[in-house]
Amino acid sequence: MQSYTIRQVAQHSRPDDCWIVIDGAVIDCSKYLQEHPGGPLSITAFAGKDCSLEFNTVHKKDLMEKFQDLVIGTLVEGIPMSEVEKHREPDDCWVVINGMVVDVTKYQHDHPGGVIALTAFGGTDCSLEFNTCHAKSLLEEEAGQYVLGPVLVQKKRRKSRRPTGAGAGGGGLSMSEVAKHTSRTDCWVVVNGFVLNVTEFLPQHPGGEAAIMQYAGKDASEEWNMIHQPEVLEKYGGKYIVGKLGAGVATSEGATTLTLDEVAKHNAKDDCWIVVNKMVYNVTEFLAVHPGGEAAIMAHAGRDASEQWNMIHPADTMEKYGKKYEVGELGSSMGGGSGGGSGVLDEDEVAKHTGEDDCWVIINGKVYDVTKWLPLHPGGVAAIMAYAGKDASEQFNMIHPEGTLEKHGKKYLVGDLGSVPAGASVANNLAEPLLQKAIPNEHWLLSVLHFKNGFLY
């Protein structure tokens, strides 16, 4: 049976085309109106809407069993992407824009940018392309009647990490290892795949020691998530993280696990690491340009500074702008291997991709391969090619809404700047810190910024 969203049902709100929803069933009442004992008006008043409450208030539940011939489908929350992909022809063209499925079949000939600008994206998500040259509100203002409903995002169940097994090598943090730490003087728990040593936190826990001790040496993820917001662990739990469940202590000869003990070794001005929200950063090069001075950072050198950082910075500041300082996630492995190229996505690697047939750019700490997007870019190929192999963050952010590429550019993402592509090895020399050109305070430079061809330079 056909599935419909409430937006699709709402398009049938006239007496000669009257759909309603009752208990999840979509019903076409157009031909039944005159037969209704209560008169047509009591149905048309709810045309295009869900009238389950009103129906059940005055009718018996089993009444609808007599009118199954009027049922044309079922109500669904959204449309799966697999369904959208079936509608990619000019005479049957659906696209996804900012999470909404839009049937542009009848609209394409009225589109100011021409038919091809729409049909080129038939059956795909073109949010990035839309947001590049349109205001977000334009969709509802100009084409709201063509919106079919939200695209259905498949929710993935969180899977607990399992022990890697004796034959897996690496001797990772398994549940059997966690189970050895069950006392008040040595208490470990697992939360969302992370192993935490909460021994020092026991006397500070607002719910008392017993609330934690009943999960000592166990996985407390389910119980934790029932009473805590997701960001609580990220903001305040970093200092207690031992590592990841199932993560190897050493992935290769000479490799090092990023534990707090390892971070603590880097506490000098010429070698300064800190932890912010479970991520380890090498801020050595940033000390000299920090607006708050070196001392503000050095006070937390070699330690977890999450709590202090989050008190005075907007959420996600480090995650958005500190990518180039990242050493790795607390509990992950670094180093090891021997010789050869590092395989790191650094500026030198990005600079190798500068042709129209191989074009990479850096935006907000992430590397994108925009080769296939060049001919589709509303601003033309040249606007992107001017920054091929370079960091175009400032220029991009000047003319695009915040989060546009992060939300809609995943199809072009190569990886985070400073990360290691799958299969590559990382030598002991970590990726060179790339925030040497970091702006101490973005407001100090406003007077020297100029515009050229629509870009900031």
Image (spheres, rainbow, N blue to C red):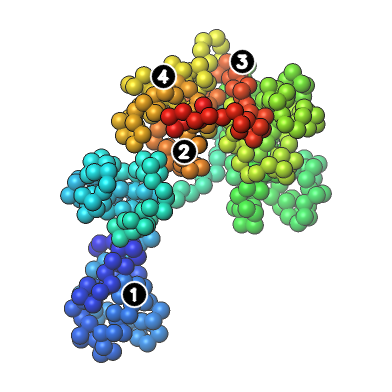
Question: Earlier along the polypeptide chain: callout 2 or callout 4?
Answer: 4
Residue type, label 4: His
Callout in the foreground (4, 3): 4
Q: What is the x, y in percent for residue 101? A: 33, 53
- Against 255, is 122 above or below? below
Say whether marks 1 and 4 touch (CB < 8 Å).
Answer: no
Q: Quadrant of residue 261?
A: top right
User: Callout 3: helix, strand or loop?
Assistant: loop
Mark 3 crowdedness (10 Å alpha carbons): few <14, some 14-19, many ≥20: few
Callout in the foreground (2, 1): 2
Say whether marks 4 and 3 touch (CB < 8 Å).
Answer: no
Q: How far, Cα to Cα, is label 1 from label 4?
A: 57 Å
Callout in the foreground (3, 2): 2
Q: Residue at x 20, y 86 (%)?
A: 35
Q: Is residue 78 left or right of residue 193?
A: left
- Residue beneath disc 1: 22
Residue type, label 2: Ile
Tell me the number on the disc at residue 429.
3
- Residue beneath disc 4: 353
Tell me the number on the disc at residue 399.
2
